[in-house]
Image (cartoon, rainbow, N blue to C red):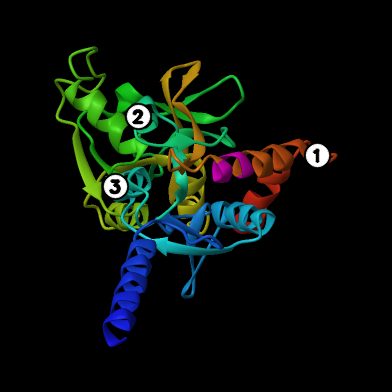
Amino acid sequence: MKKGIITIFCIVLILMTALSFSGCYADHIICYTNAFFAPFEYYDGIEIVGVDIDIMKMVAKRLGKHITFENKEFGTLINYVESGKLCDCSAAGFTITEERLEKVNFSIPYYTSTQYVVARKNKVQTFTNLDGEDCVLWEKLRDMKIGVQLDTTGHIYVEGEISGWDGEAEGILQGSDAECVEYDEAQLAYSALKVGQIDLLVVDQLPASYLTKNDGDEYIAYPLYYDETTATVEEYGIAVNKNNTVLLETINQVLTELMSQVNEHGENGIDLLVKSHYGI
């Protein structure tokens, strides 16, 4: 009798251990993020909040599940989602790329972004585009010390333009003294900029604007262009384990509905979430 009880106990223990390393429980979604990419994800006290967090809470509500958000290093997120053992998905302002698609599925694109240069006013030469915006050309970053957040698109772009694109194309900054300086978080790179450790920071549009919004005209965020008509454009998606089709379908449903809700000012549901977290 005792042996039977012990055997049952061991089986239960094994099953519980397996469940704890299999991503989500039946009624729970585990979503990994990197909470230093405001306004998409950031800390408000000890709570992780942001545009992506709001979206995933809507997804969980629709599925009738609880959801937990955990902060991880950005460069580890895609591998965690690919494995599916500790999390189900990751919402972290991901740019959809072919390389990432080999490991995970992405939701439909829900936000279009541009790479921006953040620099002290008058530090970089600018031009005015057709929309009347002051912008920066990649070639004007030659010989600069450029800060990036590790493993982000900005990091990929800067490394590619300095070192060349795996032999497929020359980089615009190749042959110059441009240097890519990596930081774990965009905020750390911005702090380094303010104390003169780097000349500028390359980061996505909204984080760039968010970082500089309280610094008046001293630090400026400029769109980054290849030529006078070609910006560095990318699209965001939410990363989901390839085996979790129900979660992916539900995320797409929520995103489609948000993007179809357009007000009299032409703003959709995603735009309004951005405004609510940006403080405008």
Q: Which is more foreground, mark 1 or mark 2?
A: 2
SS of the residue under disc 3: helix
Rendered position, 84 above or below 69 = above
Q: Can residue 234 be seen in this snapshot?
A: yes
Where does residue 7 sit, x and y in percent of width and height?
29, 76
Q: State which region is magenta.
A: 246-250
Q: Which is more foreground, mark 3 or mark 1?
A: 3
* Identity of the residue furthest to the bottom in this view: 2
Rendered position, 173 above or below 79 = above
- Residue type at the position of mark 3: Gly
Asked if the residue at tag 2 contacts the one at tag 1, i.e. Cβ–Cβ closer than 8 Å, the answer is no
Rendered position, 74 above or below 30 = above
Work out how far the residue at label 1 is from the one at label 2, CA to CA, in angstroms.
38 Å
Q: State the quadrant of the C terminus.
A: bottom right
Q: On the rendered structure, is 48 left or right of 137?
A: right
Q: State the quadrant of the N terminus.
A: bottom left
1 or 2: tag closer to the N-terminus: 2
- Residue type at the position of mark 1: His
Work out how far the residue at label 3 is from the one at label 2, CA to CA, in angstroms.
16 Å
3 or 1: tag closer to the N-terminus: 3
Where does residue 164 sit, x and y in percent of width and height?
20, 20
**Residue 81 is covered by the magenta coloring:** no
- Rate crowding at label 1 as few (under 14), some (14 to 19) or many (20 or more) other CA atoms within 10 Å: few
Which residue bears the numbered disc 1?
265
Which residue bears the numbered disc 3?
75
Which residue bears the numbered disc 2?
102
